[in-house]
Image (spheres, rainbow, N blue to C red):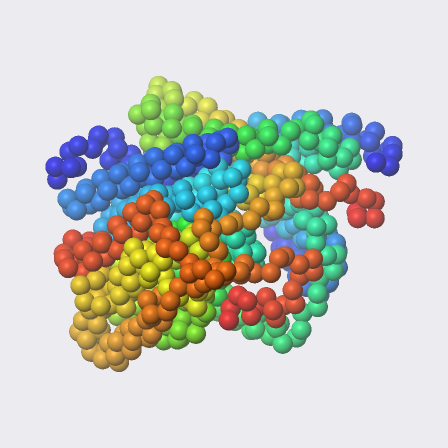
Amino acid sequence: MDILSAYPGWLIEHGAALLVILPLLMGAITAIMPSERLSWVTTMIVTLVLTVTSFGLLLTIMGGESQLYRLGGWDPPHGISFVIDGLNTPVLFLISAMALLTTLYALPSVAAEVEPKKRPPFYAAFMVGVAGLIGMVVTGDAFNVFVFLEVSSISTYVLVAMGASRDRRALTAAYNYLILGSIGATFFVIGLGFLYMETGTLNMADIGRILADLDGGSRVAMVAFGFITIGLGLKLAMFPLHMWLPGAYAHAPSFVTVFLASTATKAALYLMLRFTFTVFDPSFDYVITVVTYVLTGLGIAAMLFASLQAIFQTDARRALAFSSIAQVGYMLLGIGIATAAGLSAGYLHLLNHAVIKGALFLCLGAFWYRYGITRIDDFAGLGKMMPWTMGAFTLAGLSLIGVPATAGFVSKLNLVKAALDKEWYWAATIIVVTSVLAIIYIGRMLLTAYFQSPPEIDGEVVAKNEAPLMMLIPMWFLVLLSVAIGINADLISDAARDAAAVLMSGGS
Amino acid sequence: MTPHVILRVVSKFLIPLIAMFAFYVQFHGDYGPGGGFQAGVILAASVILYALIFGLDAAKKAIPPSWVRIGMSLGVLLYGGTGVATWFLGGEFLNYSVFTPDHPSHGQHYGILAVELGVLLAVASVMVAIFYAFGSRQPDLTDEDW
Amino acid sequence: MPSTIILDIGFMAMLVVVAIAIVRLRSLFAIVMLQGVYSLVSAMWFVSLDAVDVAFTEAAVGAGVSTVLMLAAMLLADRESLPVPMSRQIGPLIIVVLIGLAMFYALGDMPAYGDPHSPANSYVGMDYIGRTADDIHIPNVVTAVLASYRGYDTFGEAVVVFSAGLGVLLLLGLNGNAGKWRAKPNGVRISKAAAPAARRRPLPKDAVRKGDAS
């Protein structure tokens, strides 16, 4: 707790609000900045402050203190309040830290992919997106979730569409995302309306209390649960609602893909956990039915079908996007198991997958940065052309598969254990089977990269051209972090166990 | 532009009234229906009406796009800045009561006034910005297009 | 009381008619106009529900400025929408019917229309009405809730509007000159550019689908 004492008191006291307000206000300032370099520096400073602040909050949580921040000084349920507890603080830290790492990476990457005069507003949109995700996670008010869901979504649509200067298909991808995202948001807000009709309040803890008093409430609450699940399902790319994701990840600017892949679906998944276990409660019949049958079923379907689809992709980013959908399946399976062990395994996988997928997409962005390639066939000889980046890609890929001594292994092992505890042997089998499928789609990329010779252009073999240091640092940081988690997962497992404890206690 | 005499004369008379109505809606929001959102939209409508009748270039001369860009940010900053000010005065974010600790409700008045102005600025600027963006992608609208 | 119920039913019936007309029409100009009509009718309905602030917003935003913006956007695109084959309408129809059924299922347990003891009318909402006069000293409770009690939400909404403006700025530019710049790798490009240049006419629906969801 020594580090915590170095924090000024106000930073911890107002930290929750600072996490949202700082990027929003600095985003508004950045939007009118004349200089692209200045806008990057601002983004860097903002994300650094966010990371430091959320780390401080994480430390207070580990010290066993949860916080309630009353915006405008109004007590809940009349005002909006922020909640800082064991469930959302790790996600907050994840979002801030990933924002910091991707901003570091953005300097070279954005220089290659975004028009110079658009870079300040581009960084502004990025900051607003970060603030939106943080706002969704930090808040304790159900309607406020919707507002910040919109903030993050709108800026994300724009960020995805900015990939158009690299590939015009980004525009249709962003449009798809916009339509499906708006439908998801509409479902979510209809669900909230029904919840308000049932309980007369918008504060999550208050709704949870009233619903518990009503023993789950009437059919209105039941339908509200359905709408909220579908709405969040669209946002987190739950299996049949995932159609927006591959296009968005494949065509967005590299740095946006990295950030989205490692945070956006994670924030939505956190909300799913929050709503399912603390606003509603698995002790209600309809909730446990949906969790056990629907979420598990869709999770399993995602693991199988999305992994299979990943194998048949020609575009590496699209393959990894399908892999992301499959990985969301693992997390849903963890929720579906609905025991403390299952939830903590799912939560652990949420954190680990963010690290792994972030690293993988960072590498893919570097490949494009140097050679303009995204197709797997073009990977030929990358092992020689970009040895360090390819090394990082290999380690992160192994982690995605779940090779021992990597982060992926830890969370998959926990998931298998949780499934076995519940005597869901079939689920454990499917986890193993889909890991084999992951070997195929990752293996294909590795084989092409290492066992084919570099292509020739005009009779000359393409020269080695390693990614710049600004790209290698975040990439290797995440890869080494994944290995470190694989070797000693105590810290992150504890965080996941605390989060599961919050969920199992119904949020109090 | 074709000389739409009636339109021009009527709109010259109407546009200031629309803008004034916007400010009425803005400042009367404490007592009757209205507030920053509605006022911002109405204010933007007056600019858009001007652009439709006198042409986009004339509108851009009156309200330059660079102002609009700054207005967007300024609106958000004004709203957020009010919150930051309450922070520095020792309250929670957007706790307007700290402006006048002796009469919390007065502070609430000032705070509401400031944030509503922020909303007005942001909404009006963004609406005009969207219209400029769409309008600039094509030559001036001909009668057949309407 | 019954007279306003008749009014409400009339407005809702008009909304249904307008909505069906919007779905059936293919002329985008008529659709945009009807959307304005839809907003105006719902604004009137909100007035009859005593939600004047909402009605005002709906009239100003929905019927006013968004109609103009939709028209401006429409002028950049075609004037007619392409016909959608029946086979592609069945899926959405099933989904809409299912959602409707879900809502009807909930209907039986909903509080009666205008019930003063329903949770929505008795709990936090009632508190706001009771407290505003003491806390904030202004007569319009809606403004009090919007700008003070839930001022942070309104801040979020202002940011939503701001990011929409930012999006327009990034994608179109305020002077209509965005979108010409091309990204290029900082090295040798091995493969050729992945996508063909943008075409004047939109691709046939199937081609877009294949590209995005294969």
- Camera-side residue of A314 and C122: A314
Residue A169 rendering spot, x and y as whole percentages: 55, 59
x then y, percent, for residue B133: 64, 41
Q: Residue furthest front?
A: A459
Q: Nearer the viewer, residue C120 or A107?
A: A107
Q: Is residue A94 left or right of residue A237?
A: left
Relative image position of residue B4 (x, y in whole percent): 86, 35
Left or right, C213 with respect to A413, comes to: right
Circle count: 0
Residue in the picture at 48% in, 66% down? A243
Q: Is residue C144 above or below residue A303?
A: above
Q: Residue at x 38, y 25 (%)?
A: B85
Q: Residue furthest left?
A: A2
Q: Is residue A222 above or below residue B82?
A: below
Residue at the image position 48 percent from the left and 37 percent from the top: A120
Please name whichever residue, A45 or A19, is drawn nearer the observer in this view of the structure: A45
Measuring 62% from the left and 57% from the top, which residue is drawn there?
C197
Q: Is C53 left or right of A40, judged from the image as shown?
A: right
Q: Is residue C47 visible?
A: no
* Quadrant in the picture for residue A386: bottom left
Rendered location of residue A118, percent (x, y): 53, 40
Compared to C79, does A332 lie above or below? below
| A362 lies left or right of A423 | right
Residue A466 seen by the camera: yes
